[in-house]
Amino acid sequence: MEAWDPAGVRLPWLSALRGPLELTLPRPLCALPTHVNTRGADGSRVRRVSEYQHYEFLAMDRPLDSAQQAQVRALSTRARITATSFTNDYQWGNFRGDPRRLVELYYDAHLYVTNWGTHQVMLRLPKKLLDLRAVQPYLLDEHTEAWTTGTHLIVDLRSDDEGGDWDETAEDSLAAIVGVRAELTGGDLRALYLAWLSTLTAWEREDDNEEEFRRVLEPPVPAGLAELTAPQRALADFLRVDPDLLAVAAEADAAAAAQPPLSTKRDLAPLVAALPEKDKNAFLLRLALGQDPHLPTDLLHCLLGAPSSGTLPGRRSAALLLDAAHERRENRKRHALRQAAHEAGRRERAEAAVREQRLASVAEEGEAAWQRVDSLIDTKRAAEYDMAITLLQDLQEISTRAGQSQEFGRRLHLLRQQHHRKPAFIRRLDHGKLPR
């Protein structure tokens, strides 16, 4: 087998690889540019070079050795590569590697973000800790996928929103999200349910197939949807899960199916003592060798059995969930409008009370208020001009209430004549809607 770079140059060292570490750069994959949200006159998508793409990979269970890093380096000369990470941004051009293949071979987590609305995260877990059959109920369409290799299960979760706003913070999400990987290995399937809700959110945004919505039933509902962990919250935000849809889904309280509290030392001690010597030796050897992040989980599985996923059977259809989310959203909007109207009324009443106090104070001043107007104008400063206009408006209101509008008009006319050489002040009089 021979491997080639996109320019058609043969890579001898890469071609020599065999078996599970075989990494190739197929010509068709490298030749297709990533597209942006552009459509032709007929509505079909126009493919052209991308505007912005962000790639990030993390190796958590096993760092890459120097040879593996060299293999990854061949895919990008500009990427920031360490034994545990790969990060690169593309403004014009495309990544030459296959992210799925890299996750299968080397990396435990991958994040992909574009400025045309794609948010994608892949997680690789030891398949002995999470069975594919437990994941499959949550795989709704191409936005949620999972597959296995000889040793691992890979979960691929994606959200696309071409019409949405560009979220510049999305590319910093992997560190916040990656904690769901450990949660999944511990039997907490809330992250998968969130991905399923994300697909429903996209369906509601892009389609209106009521018959399909009625046909699709929700997967098992994990406990604790109303109280997500920080990584789960970050995942929900990254996958654009509709908050109202999540709130409706959480109403199926699975608290009764939640996992029991973690076992205490008193609970575990007799179980450890009862382990066969062969199993004890195997666990101690793994501990002595180190660098086995899944050792505690494996040991607990051995002592307690596989953890309960803490789920209730899914009974609701996608249509029911979406309709309930829509109703909740509309109720929330109506409540917000009522609150806004109430707050506006409160502010208006408070402002009216303050103005009445001010008018009463100005009325008590009598002729001194007009003298204060003259003093403010004589400063020839913009701020004092504004204060003079406010005071004149108050005097106009007081005169109107007292039936002395004509007298106010006469004095204002004299004021205009006296200060006609002050255009900035005269403009303020006109803008203040005071009589000419």
Image: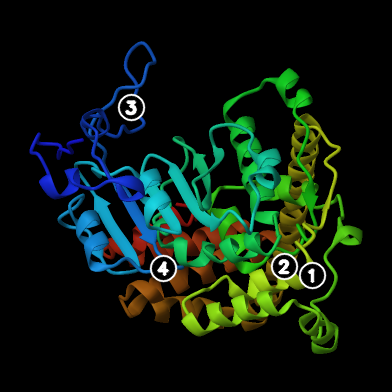
Q: Using the image, determine if residue 262 lies above or below residue 436.
A: below
Query: Which residue position is annotated with label 1?
Result: 304
Q: Which of marks 4 and 3 is nearer the N terminus?
A: 3
Amino acid type shown at disc 2: His
Q: In this view, does 418 lie to the left or right of 17?
A: right
Mark 4–mark 3 Cα distance, whole angstroms, equals: 40 Å
**Which label was assigned to residue 62?**
4
Amino acid type shown at disc 4: Arg
Residue occupying the far top of the picture: 42
Task: List x then y, in percent, for residue 306.
Answer: 75, 61
Tell me, yes or no, whether the two marked residues, 2 and 4, touch with CB atoms within 8 Å.
no
**What secondary structure is found at the residue carrying circle 1?**
helix
Tell me, yes or no, whether the two marked residues, 3 and 2, touch with CB atoms within 8 Å.
no
Amino acid type shown at disc 3: Thr
Between 430 and 405, the one nearer to me in the picture: 430
Tell me, yes or no, whether the two marked residues, 2 and 1, touch with CB atoms within 8 Å.
yes
Q: In this view, does 241 lie to the left or right of 211?
A: left
Residue 396 can be seen, yes or no: no
Mark 2–mark 1 Cα distance, whole angstroms, equals: 5 Å
Mark 3–mark 2 Cα distance, whole angstroms, equals: 50 Å
Query: Which residue position is annotated with label 2?
Result: 301
Task: List x then y, in percent, for residue 425.
Answer: 35, 64
Residue occupying the far right of the picture: 256
